[in-house]
Image: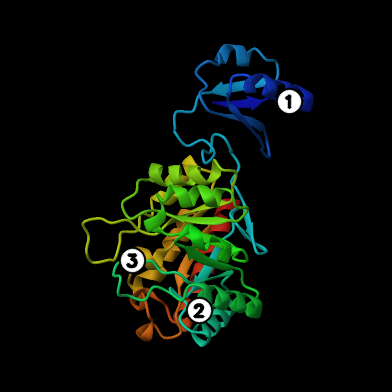
Amino acid sequence: MVIVIRDNATDVQVNELMDWLQGFNVKTNLVEGVHSRIIGLIGDTTPIDIDAVKARGIVESVKRVQEPYKNANRRFHPDDTIIEAGGVTIGGGGLTVMAGPCSVETEKQLMETAIAVKEAGADMLRGGAFKPRTSPYAFQGLGKEGIELLLKAKKETGLPIVTEIMDLSDLDLFADVDVVQVGARNMQNFTLLKALGRCDKPVLLKRGLSATLQELLMSAEYIMSEGNSKVMLCERGIRTFETETRNTLDISAVPLLRQKTHLPLVIDPSHATGISSLVEPMAICAVAAGADALEIEVHIDPKTAWSDGAQSLTPEQFKTSMRKIRAMENFRKTELAD
């Protein structure tokens, strides 16, 4: 249930209303928007009489919410959420670019890539310390050493870091990581999601290979229901019958999710296509569609990459792509301003 409060309501009146509502054994969530205040109710609201709520003089309107996700629902939070991570903001109309190698391989490889993506205009450094791989014989990442190298690159370049967690037992290693990424294969690892919900750290949640948008939102709800509202959703391609690309980028997810949720939206064109020549056009499409951020794989020498070299851009390719991506961002801002 969502209750919209009148502009002239006092804080005392709002608190009295919330105390009354909590008597029905529901959780109340007061959202202070730019133009309005909203009380969202989470729990079994069937005993609450809508007419009785409307009778309160400070209530402008009441709506029952049918969707199973509440915290992530735009009806509960009309204004877009803006997340701060290491001094960088995600959401709010701008475009944040996260770039770096699929896997952290060596100090030289990571440092050179980090410096290159920063010079090209990236806002954050992404890199995999732990790597979920389809084959148990493939490179699984450097683990703790990889995180240490990422933190060293952060100190060297000033770029906040984004890296993926695979197992709850490794959570302590992520204490200084700016954004914790949950990969597609862990999107419904509910134990992990709930643990991240108890952390005061931004989470980048990737859509599962065969997950619906509602399933993605419900996974976000697992995190948010534990108290962490710093969640961003990532569309990284879904599995379809098409075999020409690694996955199929669901670009329609951006405007659809924009209607359903207030959370920032990220597009990963690298995993979505698996082909480096397709990364740039898909990134530009994502910006045009309204994405808040991009996650792009860059490697100093993709031919020798220990994982996913086929979808990685060289630093020079990334630099060229960034000029076009920023041009589309500026065009989008101009069109929205008009």
Nearest the viewer among 333 and 227 is 227
Query: Which residue is painted at 40% across and 65% down in the image?
Result: 269
The answer to the question of whether label 3 and label 2 lie on touching residues, with beta carbons closer than 8 A, is no
Mark 3 Cα within 10 Å, few/some/many (few <14, many 20+)?
Answer: many
Closer to viewer: mark 3 or mark 2: 3
User: How far apart in space, not on screen, are marks 3 and 1 (Cα)?
Assistant: 50 Å
Labels 1 and 2: the sequence-earlier one: 1
Of badges 3 and 1, the one in the foreground is 1
Circle 1 residue: 15
Position of 218 compared to 171: left or right? left
Q: Is residue 86 visible?
A: yes
Which element is circle 1 on? helix
Considering the image in quadrants, where does the N terminus appear?
A: top right
Q: Position of residue 90 (x, y in %)?
A: 59, 57
**To which residue does mark 3 refer?**
273
Identity of the residue drawn at 67% across and 33% down: 36
What amino acid is labelled 1 in the image?
Answer: Asn
- Amino acid on which the number 3 mark rests in the picture: Thr
- Is disc 2 surrounded by few (<14), some (14 to 19) or many (20+) residues within 10 Å? some
Label 2 amino acid?
Lys
Residue 216, given in percent of the width and then of the height, sits at 42, 47
Q: Secondary structure at mark 3?
A: helix
Tag 2 secondary structure: helix
Q: Give the residue at mark 2.
A: 319
Q: Are marks 1 and 2 in contact (CB under 8 Å)?
A: no
